[in-house]
Image (cartoon, rainbow, N blue to C red):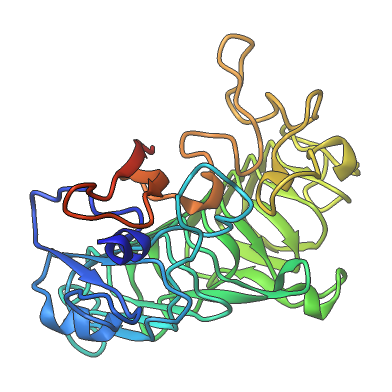
Amino acid sequence: MKKLFLFAATILLYVNCFGKIWRVNNNSGITADFTTLQAAHNGANAGDTIYLESSPTSYGSLTASKKIIIIGTGYFLDQNTGLQAFTLTSKVGSITLNGVSSGNPSGGSSGSIIEGLTFEGNTVYVNANDIVIRKNYFGSFNGNSPDWTTGAINIGYNWSVSNTIISQNFACYINNNQPSTGILIMNNFIEYGLAYGEGTTNQCLVLHVNTIAIVKNNIFRRGAVLAYNSNFTNNIMYTGYFSGSGNLISNNLAGGTQFGTSDGNQSNVSMASVFELAGSYDAFYKLKAGSPALGAGYGSTAQNPVDAGMYGGSTPYVLSGIPAIPSIYFFANQPVGSNSDPIDVQIKVRSNK
């Protein structure tokens, strides 16, 4: 029982009324439905939910051919305390989301959701429609740097896709290889890895010349952005480069002159005046008191302020990528027991948005 609680961790209380729930756990001594992500996908039916439980070992890569919901435990759990009782994450390799057949992005894994996973520099390949990728960590560590390298989200990797939502992810770069529609990129921490230097010209976001996207409330930490005919609103560019044509650009802040000063954009902003620059790896980028990003977003009013950056807007970034399901944030148990003195277990549960 103790081991069950230790590794099932934080996700057993959620009830999904629309499909079967499958547990995946590769820890020694734990009995679960599967031990790898690919095996869980193969054994599940379309519309089922797969929970990847806490583990020090990766659950491997996945090539998906059916609609599936994959939920992990979040990340930076040792820094953002009080969110999960157990701080091990749900590590995976690369994930490929395919349509019903080659060149056809409908059917297959269309409608899938990927949430709360740790990719450690690995990639998601989107070859299907109606995909949601949110609250995942794509970076890898070197010392105290959680973004030494970053993993990629490739939208329309082999062919055009529609209706892709990339939201609330940390330490990723994004490529859009084929003309695509309905692309929404919001409240992410987007960058190219620190290993390539603060002045890197590697692209942290590149959109196909025939793709129109909405890009809002992101932080661009480093790297180059290339986009065409898209809407850029309420973003903050810490350092980096911006190029392209036909874009609508408003209410963004930049450390240089990347966005200009018209239409509510701010240039040459000191990032020390914008962010708290303290705390956990992702709390580091919360807006500090008096920040010029507070109330600087499009449509902001005194009564209803809209902030720029990943903690602003309608879908603010969530610390540690905690999925929107109940989690166990406290666990304690009596170490030994007997027939006359049963083992006492105490848990505390919180809801999450």
Quadrant (top left/top right/bottom left/bottom right) for the N terminus: bottom left
Residue 338's x, y, as percent?
A: 23, 55
In the image, taking residue 343 as reference, residue 315 lies left or right, namely right
Q: Position of residue 267 (x, y in %)?
A: 86, 42
Q: Is residue 122 left or right of residue 353?
A: right
Left or right side of 160 for 259: right
Instruction: Please tell me whether residue 62 is drawn above or below residue 150 in the rendered image.
Output: below
Residue at the limit of the structure toward the bottom, as seen here: 102
Question: Would residue 243 be seen by someone viewing this image from the given angle?
Answer: yes
The quarter in which the C terminus is drawn is top left
* Left or right: 266 in relation to 310: right
- Number of residue marks: 0
At a point 18% along the width and 48% down the height, the residue shown is: 340
Q: Is residue 211 above or below residue 14?
A: below
Quadrant position of residue 58? bottom left
- Foreground residue among 348 and 254: 348
Q: Which residue is at a point 44% across and 83% down the rendered structure image?
A: 93
Residue 269 visible within the image: no
Question: Residue drawn 53% across and 72% down?
Answer: 208
Q: Name the residue nearer the viewer: 239 or 20.
A: 20
View extreme (front): residue: 340
Residue 52, position as x, y percentages in the image? 32, 68
Residue 229 at x, y = what percent? Answer: 56, 57
Relative to 316, residue 85 above or below: below
Q: Residue at x 8, y 53 (%)?
A: 18
